[in-house]
Image (spheres, rainbow, N blue to C red):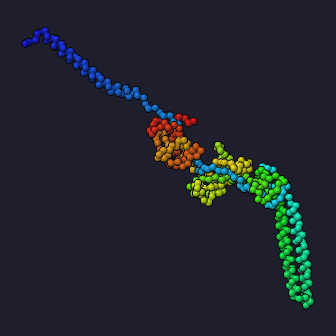
């Protein structure tokens, strides 16, 4: 059955509305597609760029750097003598002041020597008696020889007289030895300084009976100018030390704890003839002039043994050197202000300066502070050195 004529316009109107809606939707979709790339680009522009890492940078330099070995040493008197008596007796007097210098040969003490003088005089008297008897025996020997030639005395009497002369000659020699012994013993009553040095505290007061076996002695004298410093270094450094010594005397610097300037400069005088198997170290000794007594026996010091110099070496602050599982490395800043990891070989690190044996050229810029914030390839903002 045919539709009414009034329904046809309504159907056409609905079709037109549908077509208009479809067109509007297509236009909206097209516009969204056109706007999407621009929005992505704007979003990319709006995203913040990676932050620059603030670091301190310094250029590697060339310099002559001392090649040194570090150790800890103990100051020792060059010579130390405990003065003792060599005879028994009463200590009469002392001839030194505690803590003051003494000269070699200076009288330090006197011991009661009356008995020793008497013994010397007795030995001299015995020798004089025997010398007189010997002189008489020699005269008698001459007379006996004359009588024998004249036939007035027997040959036996001549031999007897010769034997007596020999006997008395031996007695005089023994007497002379006894006199010398008594003189030496008397000399022991005056005790003199065997070396020049500094006297310590007196260990015995006058009036006491002293003996050679007393454990403490009378006083200890230490020679402290020049003075020695004993120290040790790892045993594996022996070859380097010996090679350096072959080129000439080696300088040794002594530093007091906490001080940056050396207290004294000396010369290496001893490398022990074997490595200590227990500690794996080698014992060494250096000698220092000590006119101002800046070094004192028993004092602990930091010691630097100078083996030579790194000539025209590449150097950086030791804070630039980092250590990783693969060894030492530094961060090098390139022309694009990016930090690059550079493996290096360190020859020495002393006094805040690292000597770079391999891996770096003079003039290259390295990061000396702020490495903990860096990663390889990170862009940096350079700060002025402090």
Judge whether 333 appears above or below 169 on screen.
Answer: above
Q: Where is residue 138 in the image (x, y as percent from the top left)?
A: 89, 80
Judge whether 16 appears above or below 56 on screen.
Answer: above
Quick one: 256 or 30, which is closer to the camera? 256
> Which quadrant of the figure has residue 112?
bottom right
Quick one: 14 or 146, which is closer to the camera? 146
Q: Position of residue 71 (x, y in %)?
A: 61, 50
Q: Which residue lies furthest to the bottom in this view?
A: 151
Q: Residue furthest left?
A: 1
Which residue appears at 86% of the width and 63% of the height? 116
Q: Where is residue 2 in the image (x, y as percent from the top left)?
A: 8, 12
Which residue appears at 88% of the width and 61% of the height? 114
Q: Left of 199 or right of it: where is 283?
A: left
Which residue appears at 65% of the width and 57% of the height? 270
Q: Residue furthest front?
A: 209
Which quarter of the rendered picture does the C terminus lie within?
top right
Q: Left of 276 or right of it: where is 10?
A: left
């Amino acid at each position: 059955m045919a539709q009414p004529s009034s329904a046809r316009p309504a159907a056409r109107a609905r079709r037109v509305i549908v077509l208009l809606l479809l067109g509007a939707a297509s236009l909206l979709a097209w516009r969204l597609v056109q706007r999407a790339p621009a929005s992505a680009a704007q979003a990319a522009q709006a995203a913040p760029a990676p932050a620059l890492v603030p670091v301190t940078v310094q250029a590697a330099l060339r310099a002559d750097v001392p090649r040194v070995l570090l150790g800890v040493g103990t100051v020792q008197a060059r010579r130390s003598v405990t003065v003792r008596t060599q005879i028994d007796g009463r200590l009469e007097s002392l001839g030194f002041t505690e803590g003051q210098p003494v000269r070699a040969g200076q009288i330090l003490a006197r011991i009661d020597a009356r008995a020793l003088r008497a013994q010397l005089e007795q030995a001299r008297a015995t020798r004089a008696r025997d010398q007189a008897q010997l002189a008489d025996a020699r005269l008698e020997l001459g007379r006996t020889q004359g009588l024998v030639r004249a036939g007035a005395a027997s040959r036996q009497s001549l031999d007897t007289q010769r034997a007596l002369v020999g006997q008395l000659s031996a007695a005089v020699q023994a007497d002379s030895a006894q006199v010398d012994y008594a003189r030496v013993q008397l000399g022991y009553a005056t005790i003199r300084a065997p070396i020049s040095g500094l006297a310590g505290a007196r260990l015995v007061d006058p009036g006491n009976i002293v003996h050679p076996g007393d454990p403490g002695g009378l006083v200890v004298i230490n020679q402290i100018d020049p003075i020695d410093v004993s120290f040790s270094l790892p045993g594996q450094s022996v070859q380097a030390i010996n090679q350096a010594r072959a080129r000439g005397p080696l300088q040794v610097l002594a530093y007091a704890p906490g001080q940056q300037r050396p207290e004294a400069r000396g010369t290496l005088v001893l490398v022990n003839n074997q490595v200590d198997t227990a500690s794996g170290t080698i014992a060494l000794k250096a000698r220092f002039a000590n006119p101002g007594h800046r070094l004192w026996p028993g004092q602990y010091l930091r010691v630097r043994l100078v083996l030579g110099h790194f000539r025209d070496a590449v150097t950086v602050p030791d804070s630039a050197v980092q250590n990783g599982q693969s060894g030492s490395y530094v961060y090098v800043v390139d022309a694009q202000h990016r930090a690059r990891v550079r493996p290096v070989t360190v020859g020495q690190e002393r006094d805040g300066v690292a000597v770079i044996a391999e891996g770096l050229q003079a003039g290259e810029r390295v990061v000396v502070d702020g490495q903990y914030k860096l990663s390889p390839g990170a862009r940096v903002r350079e700060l002025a050195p402090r």
